Amino acid sequence: MFENRKGSTKGDEKLVVFVFFYLYSTGVYHSIHYQKKKDQYGPEEQVSVVVYYYFKGKKVKWMVGVGVKIKDWNGSETSPISKSDKDYRNKNLKVQDFVIRVNKEIQKIELDGLIPYPELVKKNLKFREQRKIVKTKREFDFFMLKDEYLKSVRINTDMKESTKKVIKSNFTQICNFIQDELRENYFSLDRFDEDFLEKYRFHCVKQMNRSNSTIQKQLKVLRTFLNWCNRRGYSEIILPRLKITSVEKDIVYLKLEEVVQLSEFTDFEYSNEKHLQYTSEYYSDHLSNRKGKKIRTYTNLEVYS
């Protein structure tokens, strides 16, 4: 079928490999779209980022509304735009968000018992965009932005390490609820509404037996996260206020000898090996004095007792 005028079969073999890869490769990929030769672009000139979907020898392309200088493009799967671009975080999130939407549409088509041919995926996405009025960037995925937020928490030098661990722990509880109870692996920010809060409160009280103060602390972390998203232009979502009424409890009075006994109880302390019978959750503080820096570790029971 293909003629090699030099009499060698190497060219044919390369062509066969290329054709095989083109016909059988499947997936969603991002790239940059050159409209002229690469060496014709100036150092400050930007190239459009595109997303491709390949399936059974067919492909479609979308422009995602992101431009990048060639020197700032590294093409990695999760962060294709390098930190040398001042707006790299926002641009990477836009690219990742579009890839997620394409993959979601492919899954919907497959669940309907259809074959996700590229043209069908592109047609369905266009139809959904036409029906949807987007006033804000509400389609950003919670899990994706949560990872970005926790990165900013980790590098915050004004925040204690124990506080960072509490924030991470609270996020873990919220993520577990969304994935295990709501059975969602993609959760857009506009879904943090009153309905979500009511379901989450019911889950915390009835299934997890959490106190009202614990629920309020977790919602405070979620509210701070959404405010962070607003400041960076990812959304305009504000978490509604949920009134949590306290249940009256009997007041327990301790006798003097009981107070003394409690103050002398050291089994909860990190330095006591017996603490492993009660907990394995720890917090650390970085202390400074004249002798230098020191790390002090506490158990969670030691902190709250």
Image (tube, grey):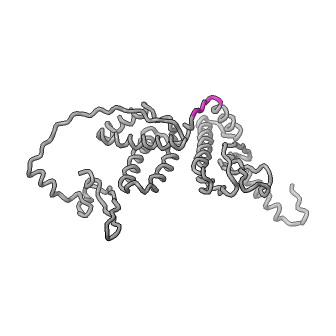
In this picture, residue 265 sits left or right of residue 144: left
Residue at x 45% of width, y 44% of height: 225
Q: Residue 108 appears at what percent x and percent y? A: 59, 37
Compared with residue 248, is residue 225 higher up or lower down, i.e. above or below? below
Q: Residue furthest top?
A: 131
Q: Residue 284 appears at what percent x and percent y? A: 34, 59
Residue at x 16% of width, y 39% of height: 251
Q: Residue furthest right?
A: 5
Q: In which quarter of the image is the N terminus?
A: bottom right
Q: Residue 120 appears at what percent x and percent y? A: 69, 36
Q: Does the magenta stretch include residue 265?
A: no
In this picture, residue 302 sits left or right of residue 73: left
Q: Is residue 134 magenta?
A: yes
> Is any part of residue 67 visible from this angle?
yes
Which region is colored magenta? 130-135
In this picture, residue 209 sits left or right of residue 241: left
Q: Nearer the viewer, residue 297 or 109?
A: 297
Q: Residue 39 appears at what percent x and percent y? A: 78, 58
